[in-house]
Image: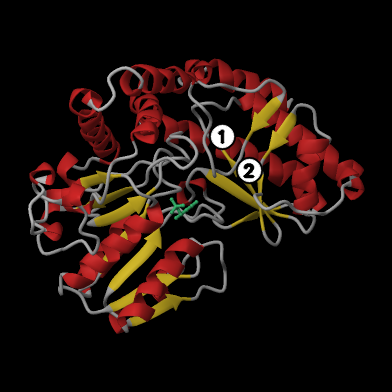
Amino acid sequence: MIFDKANELDKNDPLKDFQGLFTKPSNLIYLDGNSLGMLPKITSKRMEQVINDEWGQELIGSWNKNWLELNKRVENKLGQIINADAQEIFVGDSTSINLYKLAKALMQSKKYQKNFVTDNLNFPSDRYILSGIADYDNITYQEIIFDDLGEANLPKIEHSFKNHPGIYCFSLTTYLSAYLYPVKKINRLAKKFNSIVIWDFSHAIGAVEIDVKQQEILAAVGCTYKHLNGGPGAPGFLFVEKETNKSMLTPIQGWFGHSKTFDFADEYQKGAGSKQYKVGTPNILSLAAMECGLDITLEATVSTIRSKNLTMAKFVQDYIQDELKIFGVEVFGPTNELSRGGHLTVTHSENWRICKALQEIAAPKIITDFRPDSFMRIAFTPLYTSYEELAYFLNSLKNILETKSYLSIDSSRPEVT
Ligand SMILES: Cc1ncc(COP(=O)(O)O)c(C=O)c1O
């Protein structure tokens, strides 16, 4: 029954041809949630070209011939995905480093009170970075604490803006439950109380529609190795709206951020727009790999991706409700799929062993991911996942729960889960 429904949905899937653009290992269903997107087939060819031709043959000449242009092109393409101008985007470094630069540069602008605020739904690295700056620079750092880690409580956020105006940071889609903040509403509240929000797009970009102009977003950071399929350790990015950027100064004044990098001037002069956030030599190999992922997303369009993601979420959630709830599986966080980003999280006291059973017992092997203490994240990545794969997953999960086969799995945990 679930397979019939899946086959019908697959037949009408506007993205079905995109699955062939990815390297899909046989006998594996990949629903990782989402720490690393799949490898686009074209990326391997592109890497050979950059390594063998551009680096191997052209050597230093490739900077002028290919690589400076590559950097600009990628910034342009990333800008298209979030409706930002190219001069508002910097691509490079990691999300964490970009957050450091942006938070310090906003502090330096003197437009906001020196008070960092985030919440306990945010990714740990963001919280470490902000509290680290606060320790060094002797400014205040606070976290809004939500008892329910599944979703934010808006009155609590409003109360915080009112009482602690300053520089805020939230993950647009949270890493644990994929809760999606009402971004425009929060930006308007921030403005009303002389605050600014740095949005972390890491789990959102490529999965949900982002329009920085329409959503009145002034500052953001993010990564490209999740829903943009840029590859392991792919470059992060930073967005800062052009008027906001005028009064900002990067805390890391590297030569690539200088207005005239190759003049080798004695004095630092910040580059125009987002150029000031460049620090050192761009990571050409990872930029080239990442561009392949960006191209696929641009071709598919994020609105089509999001629309399939919502149908997939309903497909899975309905089955959990009807067939798996009796085994103790609960949806964690928002139950309305419109308030969730690209993945669904479920709780079960044995989720670690269940995740392992999906990999070790199920055939085909199924990769989801586990977050302590009892969370299983299931990503719906419409570019490379079929409804039939979701049906296999649900069927296997039911089987494991029904037979309690997870009890035979040992509970040791490796470093990366
Ligand atoms: C929401 C979020 N923010 C920040 C990070 C840290 O990113 P990076 O390792 O690129 O600094 C991650 C990593 O997965 C993340 O998921």
Residue ID at (56%, 61%): 150
Quadrant containing the N terminus in the rendered view: top right
Q: Position of residue 156 (x, y in %)?
A: 41, 75
Q: How many marks?
A: 2
Q: CA distance from mark 2 to mark 1?
A: 8 Å
Q: Position of residue 400 (x, y in %)?
A: 84, 41
Residue ID at (16%, 63%): 249
Residue ID at (75%, 31%): 365
Lateral position of residue 407 relative to residue 85, left or right: right
Q: Nearer the viewer, residue 216 or 143?
A: 143
For the rendered model, the colour scheme is: secondary structure
Residue ID at (40%, 57%): 96
Q: Is residue 401 above or below residue 411?
A: above
**Is residue 397 among the parts visible in the rendering?**
no
Q: Which mark is residue 312?
A: 1
Q: Is residue 142 above or below residue 314?
A: below
Q: Position of residue 98 (x, y in %)?
A: 32, 56
Which image quadrant for residue 243? bottom left
Which image quadrant for residue 65? top left
Check disc 1 and report its element: helix, strand or loop.
helix
**Is residue 332 among the parts visible in the rendering?**
yes
Say which residue label 2 marks: 317
Q: Position of residue 114 (x, y in %)?
A: 25, 79
Please name the amino acid that badge 1 sits on. Answer: Met
Please name the amino acid that badge 2 sits on. Answer: Gln
Lateral position of residue 210 relative to residue 13, left or right: left
